Image: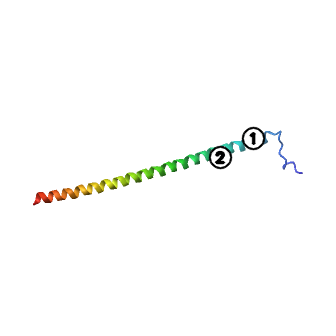
């Protein structure tokens, strides 16, 4: 067999390559955790938009109530006009 196909375990190059491979593995793990954190943030923003949606619904009810007040005000001004 060719000498190049069998890695020389005693060489420094072999250890450097294995250390690089380990550090790449660690980087991939941290990237995976970061992606998980990003996904959790998106989940949080999804809940946030749901909460904002509820606020907007509440705001819609508020404007409906204001609309009723404006109608009542219109009746009052009509009464004053008469």
Number of numbered tags placed on the structure image: 2
Which residue is rendered at x = 41% and y = 54% of the image?
A: 53
The residue under label 2 is 28
Q: Quadrant of residue 10?
A: top right
Quarter of the rendering occupied by the C terminus: bottom left
What residue sits 60% from the left and 45% below the top?
33
What residue does disc 1 label? 16
Q: Position of residue 40 (x, y in %)?
A: 54, 48
Q: How crowded is mark 2: few (under 14 residues within 10 Å), some or many (20 or more)?
A: few
The relative height of residue 20 versus residue 82 in the rendered view (above or below) is above
Q: Which residue is drawn at 65% across and 45% down?
A: 29
Q: Is mark 2 on a helix, strand or loop?
A: helix
Give percent across and percent down for residue 30: 62, 44
Mark 1 lies on a secondary structure that is helix
60 sits left or right of 4 in the view? left
Q: Nearer the viewer, residue 4 or 33?
A: 33
- Colouring used for the render: rainbow
Q: Horizontal and vertical percent for residue 1?
A: 89, 51
Q: Of residues 54 and 15, which is closer to you in this image?
A: 54
Q: Marks 2 and 1, Cα distance to the nearest angstrom?
A: 18 Å
Asked if residue 36 lies left or right of residue 3, the reply is left
Measuring 82% from the left and 41% from the top, which residue is drawn there? 9
- Neighbourhood count class around disc 1 (C-alpha, 10 Å): few under 14, some 14–19, many 20 upward: few
């Amino acid at each position: 067999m060719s000498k190049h196909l069998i890695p020389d375990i005693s060489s420094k190059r072999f250890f450097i390559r294995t250390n690089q491979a380990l550090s790449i593995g660690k980087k991939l793990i941290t990237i995976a955790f970061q992606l998980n954190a990003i996904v959790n943030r998106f989940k949080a923003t999804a809940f946030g938009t749901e909460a904002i949606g509820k606020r907007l619904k509440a705001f819609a009810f508020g404007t409906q109530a204001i609309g009723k007040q404006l109608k009542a005000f219109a009746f009052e001004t009509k009464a004053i006009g008469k």
